[in-house]
Amino acid sequence: MAVFRKHKNAVFLRYSLLTCVGVGVILFYTLEKLEVLSPTRSLFQKVNTAYIENVLLEKSYTIPKIDELPISTRSKAILYLTENFKEVNGCRTCNRVQQKIPERVITFNIFDQLGVCNFLVFGVGFDSIMWNALNPGRTVFLEDNQEWIRKVQLSTNFLEVYKVDYTIGQSAYPSSLEQVKNENSCTAFAKGAECFLFLDLPEEIKHMTWDVIMVDAPNGGEPTRQMSIYTASILGRRNRKGTHVIVHDTHREIEQIFSDTFLCQNNLVESLERSGRTFSGSRLAIRHYFISEEAGKKNFCF
């Protein structure tokens, strides 16, 4: 009887061990399939186009460690406060920033190099406080949506925001490009003030020398960004020291074509480009141009 019990216990232990091994193998392959154990899921050390294009092509977006980003300590502090801001009244979208961290790093690097400057932003939103804090100089926002202006200024009435109107819509494209070619008032040398694509701006804003211009408005559907990109290209040509122009959402056709036409591919410094596939709820798509004094003397790139 004792021998039988020993044999029974040995069989039980053997099958238990086999079961544990089997479960372990299944669990390992399941985790590997989900990429929990994959080394590519680790937080990346440096933001660069090659990493984003090759490693994250089919994978979920992982937020990089802010302290390891290639930006200044001051910029890291601003970025950290932005990412960890929570609205006390429970608003779930009040801390949502339109641009992903890798996209914002491009602009942060520009300010780390320039320091105090004049910064013009097409668009106002929950990230406006961040952009305003980033620049020790003057930061101006242009917005067409009165409701957005009201929301933002409820708690941040210190921001300098001007209401603008975009009169050129989706239906005007692509004939708007042909019209620009045929109108003398729309050339780069005519300074564009009389062109149908040039925004009606306050005189002070129109004649200001801008060091950095960001195009992130209007929001995309109606109206389009035809006027904002064209206006940015004209204002950017007025700075003898050169102007950095950042265009967001360049995965869309109008943003892409108008950027290539009025800011010119020869002036492209860097970009994060994505295919049409969604990427963690949005797309990485931003371009950084620099219009030097020499480039400002040349016409558009039709």
Image: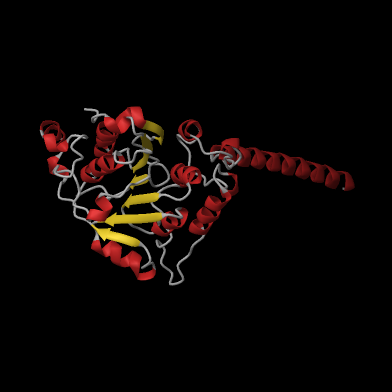
- Residue lying farthest to the front in this orientation: 240
Foreground residue, 257 or 206?
206
Most foreground residue, 89 or 192:
192
Q: Quadrant of residue 144?
A: bottom left
Q: In which image quadrant can residue 288 be found?
A: top left
Please name the residue shown 19% across and 54% down the image: 165
Tell me how the rendering is colored.
secondary structure
Q: Residue furthest right?
A: 2
Q: Residue at x 33, y 57 (%)?
A: 124
- Along the line of sight, which residue is nearer the eye, 284 or 200? 200
Residue at 22% over, 53% down: 201
Q: How many marks?
A: 0
Vertical relation: 294 (above or below) 87: above
**Residue 45 versus residue 197: which sits nearer the camera?**
197
Residue 256 image offset from top left, x and y in percent: 28, 35
Tell me where residue 46 appears, x and y as whole percent.
56, 38
Is 195 placed left or right of 292 in the picture?
left
Q: Specify whether 216 is left or right of 189.
A: right
Name the image quarter holding the C terminus. top left
Q: Percent x, y for residue 35?
A: 55, 39
Q: Residue at x 32, y 29 (%)?
A: 265
Against 213, residue 52 (above or below) is above
> Residue 66, image x and y in percent?
56, 49
